[in-house]
Image: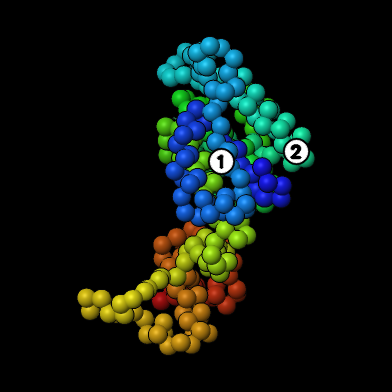
Amino acid sequence: MTTGALHIDVISIFPEMFEVPLNTGIVRRAREAGLVSIAAHDLRDWTTDKHRSVDDAPYGGGAGMVMRPEPWFAAVESLRGASLREQQAAGRAVLLTPQGRPFSQVVAQELAQEPRLILMAARYEGIDERVRDHLVDDEISIGDYVLSGGEIPAMVVVDAVVRLLPGALGSAASLREESHQGGLLEYPHYTRPPDFRGWGIPDVLLSGNHAQIDAWRRVQRLHRTSDRRPDLIADADLTAKERKFLADAAQE
Ligand code: SAM
């Protein structure tokens, strides 16, 4: 674990699922540059029976199995203990669950400020409620649908958080204007060729006038967001002039 960099522990019964995403693209480069260290742990390493079992039938009956509390407490407590010995912060334990607070760019920015995250990826019907009540610091959902496990949600969180770490992207400018930054969607992009099947590109992008290009891109962000995601506009970071511009456009 590198002191000063973000450290992320992920706990799951399928830690091998993390091999490809942790060793690909921006996440791999950020790890190699020492901006983040990430360890995927097998929950079964904290079981004490010979079958390494992590689940049991629900009290009260019903479908499916429930994850037992003991291995989760043992896993999170031992990871936190190790971090304390190394003078790291104890780390925020985050349960991935469809019942959690909605994940967003704002939540990713919040998590990127932490020195340490412990992501808990469950399976089956979920985890014994006492884990939520007495171990977990935060609960995050990646959307209003149910996946078969918390591994993919944990990967989503890792990817969104890591690319926000200073130095993770080739250009810090990429972050400034991308979708959901400041509550707006990004402007449209074009590249070569300038004419493709008779479809051209906006003249302003060929003008070389960067002030005009910036202004055009800002207007595109405003239009795109109000057309596609009007629900974002109320909380977006807009000037009074921009709000009036959108209100006038809506009236027309
Ligand atoms: N029975 C649970 C319920 O109705 O809330 C769903 C359990 S789901 C089959 C198994 C696990 O996948 C969850 O405990 C959680 O870790 C993860 N999971 C599923 N959907 C998710 C989502 N939208 N966001 C975050 N985690 C999710």
188 is higher (above) or lower (below) than 27: below
| Badge 1 element | strand
Of callouts 2 and 1, the N-terminal one: 2
The label on residue 164 is none
Q: Which residue lies furthest to the left in this view?
A: 197
The residue identified by callout 2 is 86
| Nearer the observer, 226 or 103 | 103
**Residue 223 visible in image:** no
The location of residue 158, given as percent across then percent down, is: 54, 46
- Say which residue label 1 marks: 140
Task: Name the side, left or right, on which 61 lies relative to 45.
Answer: left
Q: Residue at x 75, y 38 (%)?
A: 86
Quarter of the picture containing the N terminus is top right
User: In percent of the image, x 37 and y 73: which residue is there?
Assistant: 190
Dot 2 crowding, Cα within 10 Å, few <14, some 14–19, many 20+: few
| Residue 203 picture location, percent across and down | 37, 85
Beta carbon at label 1 within 8 Å of ligand 1: yes
Amino acid carrying label 1: it is Ile
Type of amino acid under label 2: Glu
- Residue 226 appears at what percent x and percent y? 45, 66
The quadrant holding residue 94 is top right
Quadrant containing the C terminus is: bottom left
Cα gap from disc 2 to disc 1, whole angstroms: 27 Å
Percent position of residue 199, x then y: 26, 77
Residue at position x 50%, y 27% from top? 13
Question: For the residue carrying disc 1, how many other residues have a C-alpha within 10 Å: few (<14), some (14-19), or many (20+)?
Answer: many
* Numbered disc in front, either 2 or 1: 2
